[in-house]
């Protein structure tokens, strides 16, 4: 059994400190867990209640009638070491510590508590995540031991049912940022495998988790929020294996400013280190840096669909009904390091049959609204994609209404399947939820940010080029 | 009567080419117009129908029983000059030409048609907008002569009723991009005064329109999509007057790449010129450049509320429940040219009464989720805003659920009203529609993009500094 399975894929979970009060984290965490159809057993542990939220509660972990894989500790920091000791004695294999007030408090007492956690974990050979973490979600298991509102009262399923591949794992030293990626990705139909938050990483660091997830074959893309790297050897190993497997790692690294460094120290007791050195480290390993949450989600959306169909080069064709949008996005693509060659004569002749004389078949291909209404987005995309001078295509669409996408569903799906080149959609209007779902079902990525769309396409081309070079050089 | 009133605020409008067929632009334009409660009279002009969409139609503009202020021409390009001549002869004061196929077609026939339009307009002293435009919207008049889907079947009112000030005018050489700004701004509760699209600008250029709007006092912020400036004197005049009035102009200028230049030529026959020279021109006039649609909308949201309460300097305080979000946004603020000073002792002492020891009162102020639940966002924001070392405050919130904002409505409103400093909200989760509305009613701007939030705050501070310097120097 892989080492981290008791933590991330437990069959039995004790919730130590579970409460009936849904206004406090100790009650919220159990409530969030019970809101999902987890197939394992959940055991509340409470000194003051015989039953919590409809489940029989136990006075201690030792009283639970079967072996416990994972204990979730939501009790205050000062009680954590003794409870962890009891978990170890009872044979609990893993613990997730949600309490705050350890090394990040910046005082001797917090440091001492954290040191005791480390010692107890080592003595019992327990896998311990946190402290000061926000729990995790394992979507396939429908297991969400966290108080994050992002997986509570959800309006969409944890994973879109029609997306069997291209799952995205989030590993984050910040609970807020980790679950924010989930919150922002799900309306985009992004399929998440895990959201794992690691807090102070007293025992287990985020790249040890990435390394573990590289084995279980449920995660193809990694989003990692970082304040520091505590285990450089785990990083080296995970980064090298991920690149070999073609599973991109996208990081956001905090600490380029004094403000970021201060915040990280008080947040997770992290020493953010030298920013330029981190950036060089990432470049050396083909790891992509994202500037903010939106860029991370955009990169994940694109890699999730196109990990095995990355652009072979930097030449992009743009098709558009909005002449203004074409020129503007063209500028941004070039600024992002892409090229927009004028299309070959053969392709232009085919396009010119569809496009009125006041449009353009050069590139950007300004089909005008009239040609889009008559021929549809898919036919235009198909013709541009076929050009031998482009490696990828961006179609500029208006996704405000779902009707035209519903009508073209079959053609758009065929496009995605037939084409050897990646096709991206950028919508100048805000997409309706229906459109986002249809486009996702067609296997196409839909963007709203112009800058991030351009940068994402460039990043995909750059990742493929870097990886192929690294593979030729023997990694 | 100001010169452009017959075009933008007509009392009588002829729709030449109006059709009962809602699938073609000639039918759609009238349908969109009839979807809004315009108080003036609309006269369809049709050779083939006595009635169109429930309105009596007239065989010609001359047959309309009263003087016509504005004619909307949706007929094909080759018929436009003769029809414009008939409009001039009938005393029509202004025309909006939606047809394409003029100079942007890139052939002699298109050039000749456009030259005829100019000659006829001059001979009759008619105000002519376009050709190749997408019409406009005058929200106060509920007049939307355009086929843009953005103002058809709207799910929100044209203007949020609780926003009497800070209106935003869009003037765009692209119909798609102009109305996309409206589409993206309205769910953010941005109050638009006009969306005006100008196409090829054969007779009337966008800064002549900005100049006109500076007089009518219904527009406080200008968003301008540009491929070229055709009337440099109108630009100089409008830019100078706007700066004097403290009404910021935010432009997106296409043409930094060959692709953008090509696209603009075929789109509106625009010569995009030297990009660096344009950038220098904008800087010299205190005009802000935005990189994409999202940045334009973010700047408009901020200036709309804070045009008269701009940050006096570049020092920002950040308050957050997410320690990770604080550090990350702090880095981005510094990258955008802002400063995050450690707060003064007095302010920190007050904050430390609210914040648990594992949080931080330095800056970013990491209040932790616990303190936010207990004290609320407003109290935290109030304390940080009061610090003498900050000029502006960014509160990091989770706007996914409206409940906490509903609860704090009074406090948040008081905050906006009492504080002399601008307060910005950045949400790490995607805001619910309810939250966006409540926050807008409280008079606070809500952002989702981290980079754009940081850049917007920096841009506001930069605009104030530039303008004060220019005013001291006598503009």
Image (cartoon, coloured by chain):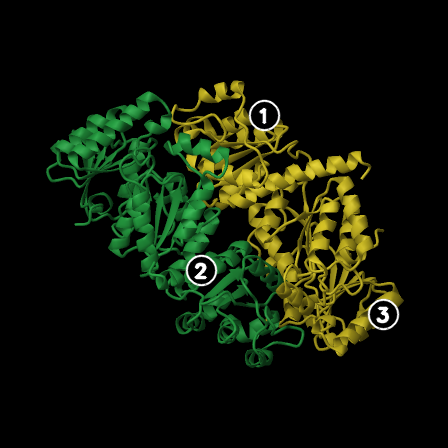
Chain colours: A green, B yellow
Residue placed most toward the observer, A445 or A342 = A342
Q: Quadrant of residue A270?
A: top left
Q: Quadrant of residue A208?
A: top left
Q: CA distance from mark 1 to mark 2?
A: 43 Å
Residue A113 lies, in percent from the top left, at 27, 25
Residue placed most toward the observer, A286 or A161 = A286
Residue A262 lies, in percent from the top left, at 45, 31
Drawn side of residue A160 relative to residue B321, left or right: left
Residue A417: tell me if it is visible.
yes
**The label number, if any, that marks residue B120 in the structure image:** 3
Name which residue lies at 27% across and 57% down.
A217
Q: Quadrant of the C terminus of chain A?
A: bottom left
Q: Quadrant of residue B333?
A: top right
The residue pinned by badge 2 equals A460
- Helix, strand or loop at label 2? It is helix
In the image as oriented, which residue stretches furthest toward the front? A473
Name which residue lies at 59% across and 39% down.
B337
Residue A401: tell me if it is visible.
no
**A418, above or below A162, in the image:** below
The subunit carrying tag 3 is B
In the image as oriented, which residue stretches furthest toward the right? B123
The residue pinned by badge 1 equals B389
Residue A36 lies, in percent from the top left, at 28, 47
Name which residue lies at 39% across and 55% down.
A190
């Amino acid at each position: 059994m892989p080492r981290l399975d008791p933590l991330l894929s437990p069959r039995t979970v004790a919730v130590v400190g579970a409460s009936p009060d849904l206004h406090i984290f100790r009650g919220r965490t159990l409530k969030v867990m019970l809101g999902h159809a987890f197939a394992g057993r959940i055991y509340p542990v409470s000194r003051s209640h015989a039953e919590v939220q409809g489940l029989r509660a136990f006075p201690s972990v030792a009283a639970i009638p079967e072996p416990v894989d994972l204990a979730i500790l939501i009790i205050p920091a000062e009680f954590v070491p003794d409870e962890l000791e009891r978990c170890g004695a009872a044979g609990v294999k893993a613990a997730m510590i949600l309490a705050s007030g350890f090394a990040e408090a910046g005082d001797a007492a917090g440091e001492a508590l954290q040191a005791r956690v480390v010692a107890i974990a080592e003595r019992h050979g327990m896998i311990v995540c946190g402290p000061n973490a926000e729990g995790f979600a394992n979507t396939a298991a429908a297991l969400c031991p966290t108080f994050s509102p992002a997986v509570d009262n959800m309006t969409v399923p944890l994973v879109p049912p029609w997306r069997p591949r291209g799952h995205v794992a989030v590993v984050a030293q910040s609970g807020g940022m980790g679950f924010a990626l989930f919150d922002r990705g799900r309306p985009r139909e992004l399929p998440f495998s895990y959201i794992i938050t690691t807090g102070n990483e007293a025992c287990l660091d985020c790249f040890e988790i990435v390394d573990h997830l590289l084995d279980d074959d449920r995660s193809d893309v990694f989003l990692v929020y970082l304040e520091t790297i505590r285990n450089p050897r785990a990083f080296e190993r995970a980064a090298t294996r991920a690149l070999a497997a073609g599973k991109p790692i996208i990081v956001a690294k905090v600490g380029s400013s004094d403000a970021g460094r201060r915040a990280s120290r008080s947040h997770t007791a992290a020493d953010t280190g030298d920013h330029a050195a981190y950036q060089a480290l990432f470049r050396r390993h083909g790891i992509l840096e994202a500037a903010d949450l939106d860029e991370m989600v955009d990169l994940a959306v694109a890699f999730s669909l196109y990990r095995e169909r990355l652009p072979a080069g930097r030449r992009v064709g743009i098709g558009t009904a909005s002449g203004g949008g074409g020129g503007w996005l063209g500028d941004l693509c070039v600024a992002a390091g892409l090229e927009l060659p004028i299309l070959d004569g053969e392709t232009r002749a085919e396009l010119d049959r569809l496009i009125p004389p006041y449009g353009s078949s050069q590139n950007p291909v300004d089909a005008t609204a009239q040609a889009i209404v008559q021929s549809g987005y898919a036919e235009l995309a198909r013709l541009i994609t076929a050009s031998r001078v482009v490696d990828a295509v961006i179609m500029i669409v208006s996704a405000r209404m779902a009707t035209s996408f519903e009508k073209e569903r079959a053609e758009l799906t065929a496009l995605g399947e037939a084409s050897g080149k990646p096709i991206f959609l950028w919508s100048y209007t805000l997409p309706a939820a229906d459109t986002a779902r249809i486009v996702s079902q067609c296997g196409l990525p839909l963007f709203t940010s112009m800058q991030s769309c351009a940068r994402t396409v460039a990043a995909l081309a750059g990742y493929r080029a870097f990886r192929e070079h690294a593979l030729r050089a023997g990694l």
